Amino acid sequence: MINKATFRTKLTLSYFLLIFVSLGFVAFFLDKHLEQKSLSEIKSSLDNEARLIELQIVSSPGILGEPARLDRLCRNLAGAIESRITVIAPDGKVLADSEVPFERLADLENHGSRPEVLSAFKGGTGAEIRYSATLRIDMLYLAVPIAEGKGGVLRLALPLTSVQRVLLAVRKTIFAGLFFTLGLAFVLASVLAKSLVGPIKRIIYASSKFAEGDFSRRIFHNSNDEIGRLAATLNKMAQDIEEKIREIATKNQHLEAIFNSMIEGVIVTDNQSRIISINSPIEALFDIRRDAAEGKFFLEGIRNSEISALIDEAMNSARFISKEVVLIIPAQKIVQANVSPIYEHDKVTGSVAIIHDITEIRRLETMRRDFVANVSHELKTPLTSIKGFVETLLEGALDDKANSMDFLKIIKNHTDRLNVLINDLLELSHIESKEIVLNRERFKLSGLAEEVIAGFRSQAKKKGISVTSDLPSDLEICADKVKIEQVFGNLISNAIKYNKEGGFVRISSEPFGDKIKISVEDSGSGIPVKDLPRIFERFYRVDKARSRQLGGTGLGLSIVKHIVELHAGSVGVESAEGIGSKFFFTIPLT
Amino acid sequence: MFNGKRVIIVEDDRDISGLISYNLRKEGFLTEEFADGGKAMNRIGEEIFDIVVLDIMLPGVDGFEICRAINDDPRYSRSFVIMVSAKCREQDRLYAHLLGADYYLTKPFDLAELISAARESSALLDREHLIKTSG
């Protein structure tokens, strides 16, 4: 019960108990003291009165022998001192009594055996408090010998009701004082306890808030006592923790920002291979959602056993591990996985995997390697012919009149081809370098087309091919004229080369949003569907032998594509085998 | 100069093919030219040639494939394969030899080298023939 009471109640009760006990003792002894004091005072005044009456009796000679006179005297004196006066003869017989009628004195029992009377007979003063059977109240009896006992005993009796009344009055005062003081003490104790408990309550409230994680609160205190110091210490602690938390939060925000802005994918796991966090590149790479994957085991969240094995290996061996991994699901990718174990006090507690998508790098590497291989092959083939035929001639074929002229023509062809190839390569490398500056100017497209067509006239005539332009005469574009001329040149050249005898080449245009779409259509052999997607690639040829024979380098369409894209346009092709092909490109009008 | 050895030339560049053919004919070989790998394979299946001159990058079936087929063909156990290619990496040369090529010439090759390879093959074939007929 007391254990459940609040500190304030306990404190109040302690104060109260302390005051109660001390005041109780004081009241008790005061009461006793006052009681005795008043009794002895009454006794001594009764004694004095008795002495005076005894003197009166002694100084009235013969009165003891005259009962009626004695009785009168007693009655008179008793009325004056408000006490009962009894005169007892030495034999114990009552001679006179102020309260008993004279006639009935004889009925009274012998008083000689009463303790106060006995001690008076012995010559002293006898006093006793006794219940009077006659008057039915507590009485104070006091007896003195008359004429040193020779004349009997004089006894005075005072009802104690008056004494008790006095004592009661005194006690009432004391108790009233006691209760008033206790009441006051209770109130004061309560107030005092409250003022002591108040700061403690504030500390309790604030620390419960700290426990909940709210460190923004401060405890108000204005004293420098123990409680004040406790509050100050708690405040300091809360402030330190708050600062630390803020510091950590800021650091976390920085890390989070780095984490999410990284191009590389990051996977953090614990030592049970559970995913702690992943960033958005990982979401994209594995087609998963962050909130769905985090918290799961690696293989549940990211279904890649190879990376999972790398993470396990890194944690088991406590070593950095780097390996190239080929992903098949959800998309074919090549990634570089770098896995580091995370240490905490020399113990591996998890891992960080950095997943770098190197698909594009590998693709570019492959492209570059293929390009170098292609270039060397393309250069070596004409060189082989040139060297071979020169050596053949040197070895005696010069005298072979039937063939030597043909050999020389072949040598010339291949030299020209090498030259064209090198020019195309330089052109391509120049266009691809991104440093190229287009010399834009406004010009009439139809005029340019006619010029280019005129250049191919003799070539077209040989195969009986008609080359026509349907371009509107007022169609103007703003572009690099020399480069667009190259585009037309390459497209028209191809259209004539791969055309059938007596076929046609038609150049036309149609609006295409804010651009113009220009098409070069031919009636050639067409391009197989499987070759269409790769037709603009460098050195890609539908028919290698035929292309070489016709003097193609395999770079023409690639150059076309690059030039058009430099002009923010695009290229495309439609073809039907045996019917013809239609190459087109778009160019912004402005 | 006629030695009568039959040579099949599988080369998609018509000029190079013609160059090899002209020079080998001058040496007395009988030549046939094929620009397409598949067609050459068919021809090889039909008849046995003493020497096969092979380019690697060919339309249809490539040179390595043809070389492997020849190596696996018991009828061709005595024939010689001369590979002629622009591929100059050591690994291509090794691969060609693994597949059973006897000579590997990189383009642009020396004409003399080609002729000596053909002559050497021819001489070895003759010697083998001699041992066989005399023994």
Image (tube, rainbow, N blue to C red):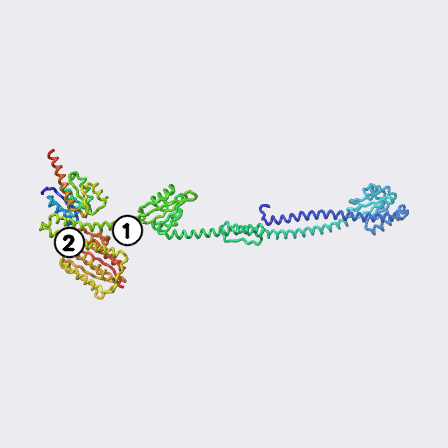
Dot 1 amino acid type = Leu
Write the residue at 86% across / 41% down: A91
Name the residue carrying label 1: A364
As measured in the structure, the alpha-carbon distance from the residue carrying label 1 to the one carrying label 2 is: 36 Å
Task: Please tell me how crowded label 1 is: few (under 14), some (14-19), or many (20+) other residues with Cα within 10 Å.
Answer: few
In the current view of this chain or complex, which residue is farthest to the front?
A: A394
- A169 displayed left or right of A196: right
Give coordinates of residue A193: x percent, y percent: 60, 51
- Residue type at tag 2: Lys
Q: Earlier in the sequence, mark 1 or mark 2?
A: 1
Residue B61 visible in the snapshot = no
Which chain is mark 1 on?
Answer: A
Q: What is the tally of numbered marks visible in this picture?
A: 2
Please identify the residue farthest to the right as the structure is shown.
A62
- The numbered dot on residue A412 is 2
Front residue (pair A240, A546): A240
Left or right: A481 as drawn, with respect to A409: right
In the picture, the quarter occupied by the C terminus of chain A is: bottom left
In the image shown, does A88 or B24 lie closer to the viewer? B24
Badge 2 density bin: few <14, some 14–19, many ≥20, Cα 10 Å = few
Q: Residue furthest bottom?
A: A474
Residue at the location (71% across, 47% down)? Answer: A28
Residue extending furthest toward the top: B135
Q: In this view, does A14 lie to the left or right of A232?
A: right
| Residue visible at 81% across and 51% down in the picture | A82
User: Quick one: SS at disc 2?
Assistant: helix
- Label 2 lies in what chain? A
Q: Pick the quarter of the image with the N terminus of chain A.
A: top right
Locate residue A185, reporting x and y percent: 65, 51
Does the rendering let one see residue A174?
A: yes
